[in-house]
Amino acid sequence: MQTLRSIEEVIEKLGGPKAVAELTNRTGSPSVVPNWVKRNKLPAKTFTTMQAALQARGLSAPNDLWGMP
């Protein structure tokens, strides 16, 4: 399993900002996902959904990208 090390990698491997916004039900504004990159933290509410999507692709990412221990 490949481990991704950055928020940018996670977003890229999940199909880009638009696909991630759809996956996480955050389609209200096109700047939502890019703002996560600027803040350098993914929202904790997206952890389970995004981790499941990564695992389905044979990928993983450290919990600290979501600000979790």
Image (cartoon, helix red, strand yellow):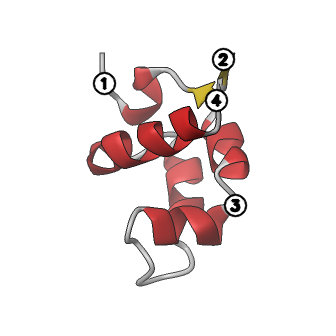
Of the numbered discs 4 and 3, the one sitting upstream in the chain is 3
Distance of mark 2 from mark 3, alpha carbons?
20 Å
| Residue under the point 50% across and 68% down | 21
Q: Which of the 4 quarters of the picture holds residue 30?
A: bottom right
Specify the amino acid type for callout 4: Gly
User: Is 64 placed left or right of 5 in the picture?
Assistant: left
Distance of mark 1 from mark 2, alpha carbons?
21 Å
Local SS, label 2: loop
Q: Nearer the viewer, mark 1 or mark 2?
A: 2
Q: Which residue is mark 3?
A: 16
Q: Residues within 10 Å of mark 2 (few under 14, many from 20)?
A: few
Q: Is residue 65 above or below residue 44?
A: above
Q: Is residue 32 visible?
A: no
| Label ID, residue 58 | 4
Local SS, label 3: loop
Asked whether the residues under the numbered discs 1 and 4 touch, taking CB atoms below 8 Å apart as contact, a structural biologist would say: no
Specify the amino acid type for callout 2: Met
Q: Is residue 23 visible?
A: yes
Distance of mark 4 from mark 3, alpha carbons?
17 Å
| Label ID, residue 1 | 2
Q: Nearer the viewer, mark 4 or mark 3?
A: 4
> Which quadrant does the N terminus fall into?
top right
Distance of mark 2 from mark 4, alpha carbons?
5 Å
User: Is 11 placed left or right of 45 in the picture?
Assistant: right
Of the numbered discs 2 and 3, the one sitting upstream in the chain is 2
| Residue under the point 49% across and 20% down | 62
Q: Which residue is mark 1?
A: 68
Most extreme residue toward the bottom, as rendered?
A: 28
Residue 24: x percent and y percent? 40, 62
Of the numbered discs 1 and 2, the one sitting upstream in the chain is 2
| Residue under the point 35% across and 49% down | 46
